[in-house]
Image (cartoon, rainbow, N blue to C red):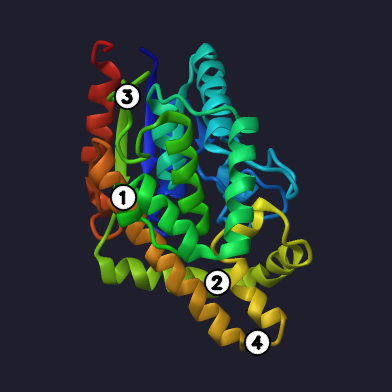
Amino acid sequence: MEKVLVIVGPTAVGKTALSIELAKKLNGEIISGDSMQVYKHLDIGTAKATEKERAGVVHHLIDCRELSETYSAADFQKEGRQAINSITAKGKLPIVVGGTGLYVQALLYDFTLGSEDESMELRVQYQEFAETYGNQKLWELLQKKDPKAAENIHFNNQKKVVRALEVFDKTGFSILTPKEKPKPLYDYFLIGLETDRKLLYDRINTRVDTMLEQGLLTEAELLYKDQTQQSVQGIGYKEFFPYFEGNATLDEATEQVKQNSRRYAKRQLTWFRNRMNTSWWDLVQEPTAIVKLERQIADWLDSSEG
């Protein structure tokens, strides 16, 4: 089995810096596991590493889609596996970095994800249903078909409700309980980064302020001008739309970004704690722990495969 190093965790916890440091030490190349970093022109709000920060380390699955294009877990699964194969063939170590839990899981395990055409057809049907009857009625449909999923998804989260309905319609099984336990395709080492909750939230708030200083509003305005795009959904963009429309102050919109980012961080942590076998580290408060972490990685790299 090919070895794959994986770094996950919530936003603002140091994944990018760690991944680049390890890639330099371990002759690695990085595969972005973030569903928004694939889009060109969205650099600030998606916290892409700058060319300088990348320090010559090759990055895959960044800036590979136009804003008008869709991008799915199935796309990531296919392209991520191609990247793993090509990196391994060069004798280098693939390092997957990201916070999108479903993407990382779909990449590492033998999940079968439906064809995009079939998914799109179902998706459009359910989106039209929601436009006609509202999110509550759409969620009630899910509640009838898959009560377990409905219990875990807020009725206003139309995207997730639609996804759960798609999965149920195509497989007959809940999105939360796949038919068979998926098997890992790689010998992977999964590092989870976390830190004290209050400290994490402070870091997220500071990061949003910094993004604003760097020009986040310009990127948000780009998406505001064409809201038909999937890329509009990213946290840090749609929250500014009421500000552009004159229905909220910049401070109110900014606070909404911070709140949504904190909530997302909480969901990310929950996903990786509950769904995957993760080795957790707090390098924010204990930076010297990296010595121990690097030892563990070295042991894993030396261990026999499988």
Tell me whether the residue at label 1 lies in contact with that at label 3, contact meaning CB atoms closer than 8 angstroms: no
Task: Give the amino acid type for the residue marked by disc 1 in the picture.
Answer: Pro
Mark found first going from the N terminus, 4 or 3: 3
- Mark 1: which secondary structure? helix
Rounded to the nearest angstrom, the CA distance separating label 2 from label 4 is: 24 Å
Mark found first going from the N terminus, 3 or 2: 3
Question: Measured from the top left, where is residue 189 in percent x and y?
Answer: 30, 29
Tell me whether the residue at label 4 lies in contact with that at label 3, contact meaning CB atoms closer than 8 angstroms: no
* Residue name at image x 38 percent, y 60 percent: 265
Horizontal placement of 150 versus 295: left or right?
right
- Mark 3: which secondary structure? loop
Task: Give the amino acid type for the residue marked by disc 4 in the picture.
Answer: Asn
User: Local crowd at mark 2 within 10 Å, few (<14), some, or many (≥20)?
Assistant: few
Question: Measured from the top left, where is residue 139 in percent x and y?
Answer: 44, 58
The image quadrant of residue 226 is bottom right
Rounded to the nearest angstrom, the CA distance separating label 1 from label 3 is: 22 Å
Indicate whether 191 appears above or below 90.
Answer: below
Task: Give the amino acid type for the residue marked by disc 2 in the picture.
Answer: Thr
The image quadrant of residue 118 is top right
**Which residue was labeled with disc 2?**
210
Task: Give the amino acid type for the residue marked by disc 3 in the picture.
Answer: Pro
Rounded to the nearest angstrom, the CA distance separating label 4 from label 3 is: 46 Å
Question: Measured from the top left, where is residue 67 in percent x and y?
Answer: 73, 50
- Residue, far right: 225
**Which residue was labeled with disc 4?**
247
Mark found first going from the N terminus, 1 or 3: 1
Please give the label number shown on residue 182.
Answer: 3
Mark found first going from the N terminus, 2 or 4: 2
Total number of numbered discs in the rendering: 4
Tell me whether the residue at label 3 lies in contact with that at label 2, contact meaning CB atoms closer than 8 angstroms: no
Tell me whether the residue at label 1 lies in contact with that at label 2, contact meaning CB atoms closer than 8 angstroms: no
